[in-house]
Amino acid sequence: MRARFKINDLRFKNGAFVIILILTTLILLPTTTFAVDPNQLSVQIEAIRRDREALVVEQRRLQAELEAVNRETQTLGSAVKSLDATRRKLAADISITNSKISSTDLNIRMLETTMEEKESQINTHEKAIGLAIQTIYHHDSRPLWLGMLSSSSFSDVWRDRTQLEGLALDLQSEVESLRQTKSILNKEKQMKEEAKKEIVNLQGELAGQKSVVEESKRAKERLLSETQAKEAAYQRMLTDNLARQKQFEEDLFKLESELKIILDPTLIPQARPGVLSWPLDKIYITQRFGKTSASGRLYASGTHNGVDFRAAQGTRVKAVLGGVVEGTGNTDEQKGCGSYGRWVLIKHGNGLTSVYAHLSATLVNAGQSVTTGQAIGYSGGTPGYFGSGYSTGPHLHLGLFASQGVSIRQFTQSRGCKQMYVPIADVKAYLDPLVYLPAI
């Protein structure tokens, strides 16, 4: 054989030999060496997981301590203890969130390593298969009579043709293997994108947790300063909060009673459990919705326009259903308003809109799309805490509306909230969240 040759100059036997050599090379290809060792990454991920398990145990202990403090009689001392316990519990939350970010980042690096390996394999195989196909095509296109003339015997011709058919089948198998590799690669790319989104969400939660810790510290200082560390002054603060709540609800009901919005009942989903999901991981209802009337539970002056859940300061609050954030706000920005405090309004695609009030921090912005169960903020309600509104203790207020009957408006007819924008709805648009939430 000449030292230099072209594939097109090969006789059939040499062409078959080249194809066999290519396929053998594919099988014996050395594993690509990467700077990051996947095994080392796995060890790091497992170590982080074990550390996180210990953190979760401590987090549960601190959560139980915080809940016990919140069940105490509402005194200045218990409020201060609650804020201190909140900071300790959130410190554990922050450690766990950091741990999740670290392990997710390592998972992304591992995915990137396997993706690079598969992309390299695909590139090598595609080039080799392309060369093999060219060789097969050249020899398969030769007329049978030409092969007979150039061969020393008929048996050689038939043997060569049989080998060619076998090689073609081998190539088909190799191509199918490549298709599967590409499919796995696409799935890994999707997993990487999902992991990146998870890191963004975790980083948002981390920022929210840190802001709650900082505000808890300021709230304690503010509470002690405004009451001068005296129990009587603290009790007057609670009484004042209740009076502001009553005034706000009266002003709100008067305005909403005048709206007279005509609601289309066909745009309101049929009441049944499970339309919405719970806004908290742990459910304990402290106050239900409205009052009973002939037409069901309806919001009316002097009654409750939502559902209250027990929730320690800094508890993660989740969207009850996917939708778009219609708006956010904080009525504590106007001194003496005492309304919802920090709130989030989400419009869902099924004709319902939900509001979450007395939050200690928010994680979403107006116009943002959210999914069911996504963290949108942290619960609040501790007196003296910026964002608590008229609340007299830690909790979450969840309200529900028929979307067609609610909008965010400036509350100009209020005595204390004239400059603030809040969700305002026709009284008929208020719905009982519990008829849509999972059955208790």
Image (cartoon, rainbow, N blue to C red):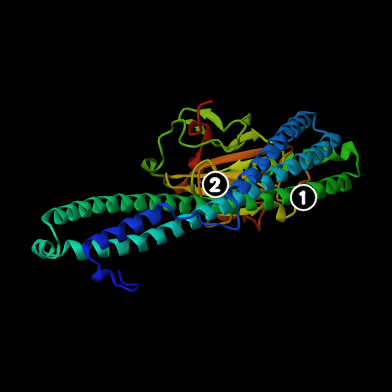
Residue 336 shows up from this direction: yes
Residue 252: image location, x then y, percent: 60, 46
Q: CA distance from mark 1 to mark 2?
A: 33 Å
In which quadrant will I find the N terminus? Answer: bottom left
Q: Where is residue 251 drawn, in percent x and y?
A: 63, 46
Residue 82: image location, x then y, percent = 79, 37
Q: Which residue is mark 2?
A: 256
| Helix, strand or loop under label 1 | helix
Q: Nearer the viewer, residue 77 or 257?
A: 77
Q: Which residue is mark 1?
A: 215
For residue 256, side relative to residue 14 (left or right): right
Instruction: Kindly identify the amino acid type of the residue bearing the numbered disc 1.
Output: Glu
Instruction: Specify the farthest residue to the left.
Output: 145
Residue 416 visible to the viewer? no
Q: Which residue in the rendered view is the most extreme toward the front?
A: 152
Counting residues from the start of the chain, the first of labels 1 and 2 encountered is: 1
Residue 155 in the figure: left or right of residue 15: left
> Vertical placement of 72 versus 187: above or below?
above
Q: Which residue is found at the position 63% from the left and 34% from the top?
A: 309
Mark linked to residue 300 = none
